[in-house]
């Protein structure tokens, strides 16, 4: 269904050599996405070439910007139809991922892909809000990496992701062209939540435009009062020193 040679080429540009088997897994994932997208709304992207760039290659920029050591654990916050989490699990069979979302029906699709691609040893879904997960004992401070795409602005997203990330771990935010602006508005929140901006990488995905990957290291524990309740996160932005 997808042009696997194109995906292989885009992945190579990101420093990843995908095997024949991995390319087939991406192709199977695209087929499942195409089929289930007709039953439940998973993505507006339907064209196979766009899928390669906007879903698969875009997800893989996380690995290029923030290389994950063998066996690392990650949580994908607001995974939706499985992005970036599923491409990370396909490209790196050694990783362990929790694919978290507050919408159950999307996770049923993600479960089908995990099963269909034999990824159930590596990945599992979790139906929960990120703020709730961040206050749950066995999830808080638990992951080597937190990753997220298209879920919230960086300031709010930091409050979702940093509590879940271990001290010494990394929060990776996949962002579009307004990344720098978002970063400016999120600086204070990132500091308050125990993070430090380590890097911002820019990628051009074919003709699909400019993408940014913001890499934030968790350097100190997130204070116990975070994450706050959803309404507070939205209404009281962490912009002023507390
Ligand atoms: N990350 C996927 C992608 O890039 O294609 C999905 C993006 S979709 C626009 C946003 C997803 O984030 C939705 O599936 C939504 O249910 C989920 N979401 C939003 N806020 C959330 C929260 N606080 N906790 C968990 N999931 C959340």
Image (spheres, helix red, strand yellow):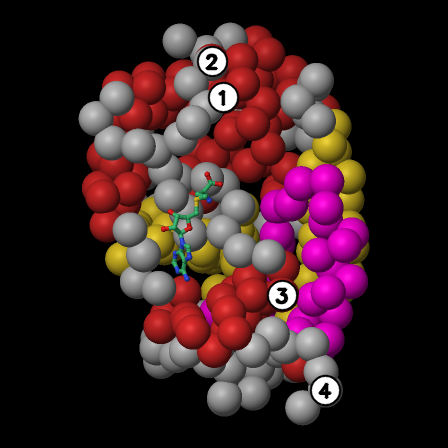
State the residue position of label 4. 241
Establish whether ligand 1 lies closer than 8 Å to the Cβ of label 1: no
Circle nearer the N terminus (3, 2): 2
Tags 2 and 1 in contact by the CB under 8 Å rule? yes
Q: Residue at x 59, y 17 (%)?
A: 8
Tell me residue 90's x, y (percent).
Answer: 44, 33
Circle nearer the N terminus (4, 3): 3
Tell me residue 61's x, y (percent).
Answer: 64, 37
- The mark closer to the camera, 1 or 3, is 3
Circle nearer the N terminus (1, 4): 1
User: Label for residue 48?
Assistant: 2
User: Label for residue 51?
Assistant: 1
Element under label 3? helix
Establish whether ligand 1 lies closer than 8 Å to the Cβ of label 3: no
User: Label for residue 155?
Assistant: 3
Element under label 4? loop
Label 1 to label 4: alpha-carbon separation: 41 Å
Depth check, front residue: 121 or 195: 195
Label 2 to label 1: alpha-carbon separation: 5 Å
Residue 141 appears in view: no
């Amino acid at each position: 269904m997808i042009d696997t040679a194109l995906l292989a080429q885009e992945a190579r540009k990101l420093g990843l050599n995908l095997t024949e088997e991995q390319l087939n897994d991406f192709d199977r994932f695209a087929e499942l996405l195409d089929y289930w997208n007709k039953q439940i709304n998973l993505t507006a992207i339907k064209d196979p070439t766009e899928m390669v760039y906007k879903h698969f290659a875009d997800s893989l920029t996380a690995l290029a910007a923030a290389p994950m050591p063998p066996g690392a654990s990650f949580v994908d916050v607001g995974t939706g139809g499985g992005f970036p989490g599923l491409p990370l699990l396909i490209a790196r069979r050694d990783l362990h991922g929790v694919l978290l979302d507050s919408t159950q029906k999307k996770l049923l699709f993600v479960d089908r892909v995990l099963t269909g691609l034999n990824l159930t040893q590596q990945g599992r879904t979790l139906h929960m809000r990120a703020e709730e997960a961040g206050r749950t004992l066995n999830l808080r401070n638990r992951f080597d990496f937190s990753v997220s795409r298209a879920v919230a602005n960086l300031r709010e997203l930091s409050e979702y992701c940093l509590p879940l990330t271990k001290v010494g771990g990394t929060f990776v935010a996949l962002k579009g062209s307004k990344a720098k602006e978002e970063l400016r508005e999120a600086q204070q929140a990132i500091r308050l939540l125990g993070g430090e901006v380590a890097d911002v990488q820019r990628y051009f995905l074919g003709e699909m435009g400019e993408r940014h990957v913001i890499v934030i290291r968790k350097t100190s524990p997130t204070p116990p009062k975070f994450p706050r309740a959803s309404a507070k996160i939205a209404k009281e932005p962490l912009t002023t020193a507390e």
